[in-house]
Amino acid sequence: MTKSRHYLAALLSTMLAGVAMAQEAQVASDDIGQMNPEATAAAFPGRGFSPYADRNYPTQVFWGDQHVHTGWSVDAGAFGATLGPEEALRFARGEQVTSSLGRPVKLSRPLDWAAITDHSDAAGVIFEIRDGNPELMADEQPRRWHDMMAAGQGVQAASEMIAAQSNNNVPASMKDPRLAMTVWQKNTSIMEKYNEPGVFTAFIGYEWTSNAGGGDNLHRNVIYRDGKAKADEVLPMTTFDSENPEDLWKWMQAWQDKTGGYLLAIPHNGNLSNGKMFALNTFLGDPLTREWAETRAKWEPMYEITQIKGDGETHPSLSPNDEFAGFEKWDAANLAGVPKTPGMIEREYARRALQEGLKLEAELGVNPFKFGFVSGTDTHTGLTTAEEDNFFGKHTGVEPSPHRWEHPVIKTPEVNVMGWQMAASGYTGVWATENTRESIWDALKRKEAYSTTGPRMTVRFFGGWDFDAKDAQTRMPAEAGYAKGVPMGGDLSAAPAGKAPSFLVAALKDPYSGNLDRIQIIKGWVDATGALQEKVHDVAWSGDRQPGADGKLPDVGNTVDVENAIWTNTIGAGELITVWRDPEFDPALRAVYYARVLEIPTPRWTAYDQKRFGIKMAPEVPMTVVERAYTSPIWYTP
């Protein structure tokens, strides 16, 4: 008791002394508390003492998937997907659900947002056919497909339905606007139910699925900024209406004019377009115009650079000096398995399109390919699983099993894409001020977002004229980034005399994934002769490695134990940050820059399958993966 009394007395004495000291300081200088706010402001210029108060820029990354299909999509439901939009959103929010094949499944961590983008063509009708909707059963073809699904011939029924859609030859009952509106309003009601501002954002959206020529992928995800009231005013556009992207842009403009709302479109899988995604002519083959360039740039501010059906950054044939260009390629054919012909690949990949955009800007006055980067899974199971150890595949036919690696995904006499070629990818990180539809959509519109192949690494990328090494010696790079430059998605122009652009780039590893190998800045430009150029710069890396005589950085190493599907983070770095200035800058030439962040090698989903199922895959199947992030670019215009 005596010790307690002594302790309390000492504590009280200390507290009273502290109060007296504070009072004396207030009397002497009035520089603490609320007695003299003017003195406080003078002592702490700017926002005040707390570095987290009154920040007027995005301070948090919100993770999501802008490309999710459920059983409501014809090519998902007919393959056996039973999860609808509601189950997909519950899963994305972090709940455990049961997969279409009866397996329990849950994400390692909840996502912050998701867009359910079921195909607008006959959206939801597949469940109506499966369940025997009387209006549809009055039509011979839907009744036949219903009977096929009931007899276990869902794959054949799906193939027929997809072919009918591609040829705009579906029965009239499947295009009935009354049925379509009923399904759409049910969809938007589900989005409203699960949209919880500040907690989880459920975007209203759909996929417009143009398969030009019967298989050339020109798909776009259409994402709404607004809620159900405006979305329900007009039915989504389908490819029954048109397969021409220019008609989609016209529809989007008419929708905005009618509702006062906002839309954007996100193209994906140019690698499966057989040269049409970034073609240098219009859909109808006409020469490009300034108006066309302005319209595309307005409606398509982002591009999906990576997903299950392959990575779309660049190709080894386009970037022969890039040792990481061969990542997860689907480059043999279009969606229908029609093989490539010479010249197609150069119109299919994002890096080359960014360079072409600079050239078109010089010719047309507007850059039509001025897009940022996002990614999505393009799952057709309703499950947004982009992690290697939790990958549930493209569709229900390739959910986890001992044989999915050898299951053909695209099979024609000329082309055979196997199940092991699926990529467990990807998620989008958005720098937004809050977790709401408006804030995240606005960040996508201004291109302040980046793509990853699955890991949730934190990446910052700023460009300006005055960054220096001290700006990389901070725990808060955004302070200098926003104060002295522009973030990813931004523009630099009119270079000050004698200055080259400098870039502040920082990356922090995903605590669930591998350490970081390096940060690279990829520059694209058009030289004085009009030729397209590119160069990959290693700007920050782990360890004490030094570039060799060829300028290449030595390999980081590999700690993967394939047999046990594990790795150690004994190589690489937890974080990397640097300021890099372009050493070859010509202020007279347009240029574009983006950052690519690479992890150390980790086990690929195929290694996890091989371990879990006790199988041995063919020698050509990759067992490791170098996960990565791509920031949206920063452009320089003279």
Image (cartoon, rainbow, N blue to C red):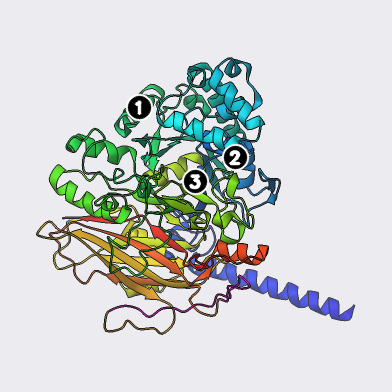
Q: Count neighbours of disc 2 (C-alpha within 10 A) and say few if under 14, some if 14 to 19, many if 20 or more.
A: some
Mark 1–mark 2 Cα distance, whole angstroms, equals 35 Å
For residue 304, side relative to residue 420 (left or right): left
Q: Secondary structure at mark 2?
A: loop
The verdict on residue 72 being magenta is no
In the displayed structure, does residue 463 sit left or right of residue 403? left
The residue indicated by pointer 2 is: 196
- Residue 267 placement: quadrant: top left
Instruction: Decide: is 182 above or below 96.
Output: above
At a point 42% along the width and 47% down the height, the residue shown is: 413
Tell which circle, 3 or 1, labels the residue nearer the N-terminal end.
Answer: 1
Kindly identify which residue carries mark 3: 378
Q: Tell me which residue sits at (64%, 22%) in the image.
A: 132
Which amino acid lies under the numbered mark 3 shown in the image of this protein? Asp
Q: Which mark is residue 242?
A: 1
Q: Secondary structure at mark 1?
A: loop
